[in-house]
Image: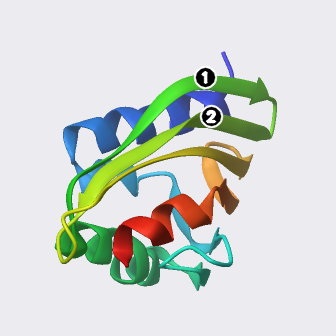
Amino acid sequence: MNTNYEAIKAHYAASDRKDVEAMMAPIARQTVWTEMAGFPYAGTYIDPEAIIAGVFKRIGEEWDDYAFSLERLVDGGSTIVGIGTYSGAYKRTGKAMHARVIHVWDTNDGKVVRFEQFTDTELVVEATS
């Protein structure tokens, strides 16, 4: 059993439960987390507190029913890839969004070293404007 794969699988299960503490379990102090350019929360965040404040807290405040629906989790050893769809409605506009997304997780011994998100940012931005 791949510890890295299991850690990311558990992250997504915690996300489904809206359990931020469990979501952050594989995130280390030195984790480099990058949200794609063009995404409303674009940038690189380092450490769990910065990731929560810069991404998850803002999503919770600005979106209704925001979710990531995991369709496929690819075990590449130390690199794990999550493929799925973002959905939600932006609170200020009331507009719904559905955008395909890929998450690339570089891991070591069940801890995230680096995360990078790839998504159709135009679909997300359309909902926010």
**Image coords of residue 5 (percent x, y):** 63, 30
Q: Which label belongs to residue 83? A: 2
Is tag 2's residue or tag 1's residue first in the polypeptide sequence?
1
Residue in the picture at 52% in, 59% down? 123
The residue indicated by pointer 1 is: 72
Give the Cα distance between marks 2 and 1.
5 Å
Q: Which of the 4 quarters of the picture holds residue 30?
A: bottom right
Q: Secondary structure at mark 1?
A: strand
On screen, 93 above or below 78?
A: below
The image position of residue 121, as x and y in percent, is 60, 65
Q: Nearer the viewer, residue 129 or 116?
A: 129
Q: Is residue 108 left or right of residue 48?
A: right
Instruction: Name the amino acid type tagged 2.
Output: Ile
Q: What residue type is disc 1 on?
A: Arg
Residue 98: numbered disc: none
Picture quadrant of residue 3: top right
Q: Residue at x 49, y 79 (%)?
A: 41
Residue depicted at x 36% and y 46%? 87
In this rendering, the answer to whether 43 lies above or below 68 is: below
Q: Is residue 7 above or below residue 89?
A: above
Q: Quadrant of the N terminus?
A: top right
Q: Quadrant of residue 10?
A: top left
Residue at the image position 27 percent from the left and 74 percent from the top: 57
Q: Residues within 10 Å of mark 1 (few under 14, many from 20)?
A: few
Q: Nearer the viewer, residue 38 or 26?
A: 38
